[in-house]
Image: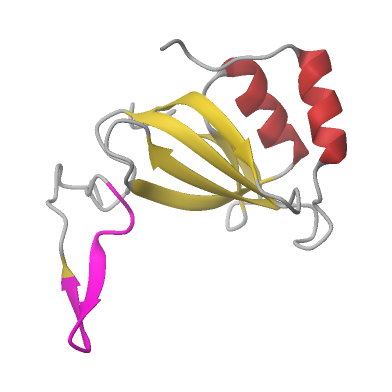
Amino acid sequence: MERFKISEKDAEEIIKTLNFSKLNGLIAVIAQDIKTNEVVMSAFANEEAIKMTLTTGYAYYWSRSRNTLWKKGETSGHLQIVKEVYLDCDQDAILLKINQITAACHTGYFSCFHKKIIDGNVEIIGEQIFKPIK
């Protein structure tokens, strides 16, 4: 399956249908690994991030803490290659089915959702793939 990419014109038309108003100009994005079906992360995107994602086939997000656009994996090499894109019924959330390169979590786990509440305790259920640089 090839990388998902559409034209700038098509991307702009789709962006016009999205509901960014609930989150101050942002939209929720969930990234799910297409091979394992594991949800690997959630983030936010503005119009520019969505346009870049749709037209390049790589996942882009808006960093609320740094107040900037970022391409997932640009510095680490842990890219998210977009394979499929889904919109929810209210047009205010996006699901990206991606090919996750190495790991999604900056703490070294494949998924940011590597902790699970079991019998009232938080337990790490994922395997750390790499040691993060501090």
**Image-quadrant location for residue 121:** bottom left
The structure residue drawn at horizontal position 79% and vertical position 18%, both measured from the top left corner, is 10
**Image-quadrant location for residue 87:** top right
Q: Is residue 69 left or right of residue 80?
A: right
Q: Is residue 75 left or right of residue 59?
A: left
Q: Which region is colored magenta?
A: 111-123
The percent coordinates of residue 57 (x first, y second) are 55, 19
The percent coordinates of residue 85 (x first, y second) are 58, 31
Extreme residue toward the front, this view? 89
Up-down relation of residue 40 to residue 51 (above or below): below
The percent coordinates of residue 49 (x first, y second) are 67, 35
Which is nearer the eye, 44 or 10?
A: 10
The structure residue drawn at horizontal position 29% and vertical position 49%, both measured from the top left corner, is 111
Up-down relation of residue 38 to residue 100 (above or below): below
Instruction: Check the picture and name the quadrant holding the N terminus.
Output: top left
Q: How is the image coloured?
A: secondary structure
Question: Is any part of residue 73 visible from this angle?
Answer: no
Question: Is any part of residue 49 visible from this angle?
Answer: yes
Which is nearer the eye, 97 or 50?
A: 97
Whether the magenta-drawn stretch holds residue 59 is answered as: no
The structure residue drawn at horizontal position 77% and vertical position 15%, both measured from the top left corner, is 8
Extreme residue toward the bottom, this view? 120
Q: Is residue 10 left or right of residue 40?
A: right
The percent coordinates of residue 4 (x first, y second) are 55, 17
**Image-quadrant location for residue 79:** top left
Whether the magenta-drawn stretch holds residue 122 is answered as: yes
Up-down relation of residue 90 to residue 33 (above or below): below
Which is nearer the eye, 17 or 49?
A: 17
Count of numbered labels shown in the rendering = 0
